[in-house]
């Protein structure tokens, strides 16, 4: 902890790092299944507002808010996923961005909307002001334990039938279907799991950041989540964790550079994308980069067999 | 075993398949030949559920499958290979064989978390089945290589092994000898005959007439989406309509 603090990583920064690692894992699930979905920020918003309203306004403990938020995000993910997951690639990305915007605007206008339906004034999301004074319930160890449990689950998932089906769908959806995999089921399940995970991260984050407003869950949050996975790499689940850590810690480590830190941050991200296209956690990518730096081509001549 | 009745498939204005009637009897090897663009792959796609006929019925052991999803058709015991190899190229050879046994497993992802007894027994069985197939297709030494890095011939054999791992009753082979030399083609023919002797039913699309003669019990000829001939390989070889479809009419 002392060492971390000396390079600018205080406990709050560490908490954000852990949260962003969880968010990175939530998009990793969909990316690993070949779905380019940017809906995670939207589900994070749904989960967070549900969780916060449950703890703050109904006095539930943290785990109550956590389960409530995860549950509602999962329930909403199903009817969204069924039609939207028929789309692919950039079309799926655009549709899911649209979903995120709808969620953000609905939360923004939630109070007058519900008031007009039930016929009496209601204060739940507090519109653009957002909710403040959220009880401080999340401890750092909660986050560490949660991240470890999720990592274990994902590691095991990769060695199960379901996890192999996910990888197969990413590589060739039609062939996967011909192997007896119910593609629609697997894709929707993964979409729901991803939504639930994003919701959990949101609830946990709100209970130490202590304020939330709809602007926190817009397009830029969706892209940030994607950046964690892209920087870290999606060849293994360790990638998004490292990506979330690095991208969160970097602005703090670079604090001495003051106003230039945003530029340095961007340059590092660019360098990684250009020279390590598989992300930071990708041994093959590092090997290739090493070869390039030493001025060797990757072509290895094979010696002719004699005798 | 497999019955196609009046199967038609329209792509916009293009009649890819036109009232195709076809029967694949159990434990027989049926060939399907035809010039390029005749609709052979469309037919296989319609049987395996990647595409659905515009009209007509397809029955597998009496069950209608013309509207079924691919995974349901696979579960009824129909496996296929592809004209252009479609392995899961980023996975190892072994993983490719584990994937195709998907529908034989029952253990959920949750069971893998707690290493339940059923999960461990199942993984064990999957690996044993895969080992048998690796041996049979001579791929043992390649088990842990990525499928995409294998030489062409090995990829072809892996695709056969992967289809077989589904444990099907009917196999659809879409040009299994494409790109093979005569020796390899003959070897594959021997493999196909061995499958039949073990009780498998096979529908094979092929250009290579030597393979058709080597293995097929009967042959259908498809041209411009229509069945123009049906008979034993010997009958087909001497059929004038077939010769015309392939080579054109002889003008005086």
Image (cartoon, coloured by chain):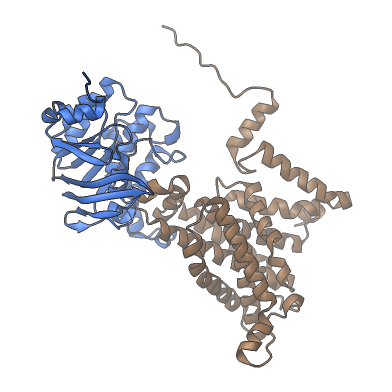
Chain colours: A brown, B blue
Frontmost residue, A203 versus A155 = A203
Residue drawn at x 37%, y 53% is A181
Frontmost residue, A30 versus A211 = A30
* Residue B69 falls in image quadrant: bottom left
Q: Indicate left or right for B61 with B38 as reference.
A: left
Number of numbered callouts drawn: 0
In the image, residue B186 above or below residue A203: above
Residue drawn at x 82%, y 47% is A263
Q: Indicate left or right for B87 with B237 as reference.
A: right
| Quadrant in the picture for the C terminus of chain B | top left
Residue A270 x, y percent position in the rendering: 72, 42
For residue B199, say whether it is visible: yes
Residue drawn at x 28%, y 45% is B17
Residue A64 x, y percent position in the rendering: 58, 78
In the image, residue A301 above or below residue A239: above
Residue furthest out toward the front:
B252
Frontmost residue, B181 versus A24 = B181
Q: Indicate left or right for A167 with A11 as reference.
A: left
Residue drawn at x 51%, y 50% is A34
Residue B123 x, y percent position in the rendering: 35, 51
Residue furthest out toward the top:
A307
In the image, residue B51 above or below residue A283: below
* Residue B40 falls in image quadrant: top left
Residue B232 x, y percent position in the rendering: 11, 33
Frontmost residue, B16 versus A79 = B16
Q: Indicate left or right for B88 with A115 as reference.
A: left
For residue A145, say whether it is visible: no
In the image, residue A117 above or below residue A83: below
């Amino acid at each position: 902890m002392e060492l971390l603090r000396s390079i600018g990583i205080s406990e709050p920064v560490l908490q954000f790092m852990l949260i962003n690692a969880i968010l990175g894992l939530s998009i990793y699930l969909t990316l690993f299944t070949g779905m380019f979905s940017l809906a995670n920020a939207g589900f994070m918003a749904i989960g967070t507002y549900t969780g916060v309203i449950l703890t703050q306004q109904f006095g539930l403990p943290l785990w109550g808010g956590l389960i409530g938020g995860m549950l509602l995000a999962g329930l909403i993910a199903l009817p969204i996923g069924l039609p939207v997951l028929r789309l692919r690639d950039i079309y799926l990305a655009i549709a899911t961005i649209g979903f995120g915007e709808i969620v953000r605007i609905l939360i923004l206008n939630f109070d007058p909307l519900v008031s007009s339906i039930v016929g009496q004034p209601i204060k739940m999301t507090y519109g653009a002001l957002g909710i403040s004074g959220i009880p401080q319930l999340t401890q750092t160890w909660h986050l560490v334990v949660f991240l470890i449990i999720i990592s274990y689950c994902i590691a095991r998932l990769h060695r199960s039938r379901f996890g192999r089906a996910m990888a197969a769908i990413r590589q060739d959806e039609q062939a996967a279907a011909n192997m007896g995999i119910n593609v629609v089921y697997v894709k929707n399940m993964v979409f729901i799991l991803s939504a639930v995970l994003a919701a959990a991260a949101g609830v946990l984050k709100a209970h130490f950041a202590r304020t939330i407003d709809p602007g926190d869950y817009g397009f830029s949050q969706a892209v940030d989540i994607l950046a964690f996975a892209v920087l870290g790499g999606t060849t293994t689940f360790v990638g998004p964790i490292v990506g979330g850590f690095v991208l969160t810690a970097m602005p703090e480590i670079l604090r001495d550079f003051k106003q230039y830190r945003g530029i340095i941050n961007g340059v590092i991200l660019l360098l990684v994308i250009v020279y390590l296209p598989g992300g930071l956690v990708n041994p093959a990518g590092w090997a290739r980069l090493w070869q390039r730096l030493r001025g060797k081509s990757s072509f290895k001549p094979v010696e002719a067999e004699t005798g | 075993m497999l019955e196609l009745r009046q199967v038609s498939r329209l792509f916009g204005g293009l009649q890819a398949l036109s009232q195709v009637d076809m029967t694949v009897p159990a434990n027989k090897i049926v060939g399907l030949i035809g010039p390029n663009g005749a609709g052979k792959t469309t037919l296989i796609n319609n049987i395996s559920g990647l595409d659905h006929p515009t009209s007509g019925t397809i029955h597998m052991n009496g069950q209608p499958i013309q509207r079924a999803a691919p995974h349901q058709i696979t579960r009824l015991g129909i496996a296929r290979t592809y004209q252009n190899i479609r392995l899961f190229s980023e996975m190892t050879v072994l993983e490719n064989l584990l994937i195709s046994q998907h529908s034989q497993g029952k253990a959920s992802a949750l069971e893998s978390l707690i290493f339940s007894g059923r999960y461990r027994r199942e993984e064990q069985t999957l690996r044993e089945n895969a080992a048998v197939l690796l041996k049979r297709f001579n791929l043992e030494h390649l088990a842990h290589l990525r499928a995409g890095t294998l030489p062409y011939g090995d990829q072809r054999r892996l695709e056969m092994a992967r289809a077989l791992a589904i444990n099907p009753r009917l196999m659809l082979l879409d040009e299994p000898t494409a790109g093979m030399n005569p020796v390899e083609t003959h070897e594959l023919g021997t493999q196909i005959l061995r499958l039949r002797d073990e009780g498998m039913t096979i529908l094979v699309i092929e250009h290579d007439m030597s393979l058709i003669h080597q293995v097929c019990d009967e042959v259908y000829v498809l041209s411009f989406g229509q069945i123009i001939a049906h008979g034993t390989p010997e009958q087909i070889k001497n059929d004038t309509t077939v010769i015309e479809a392939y080579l054109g009419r002889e003008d005086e």
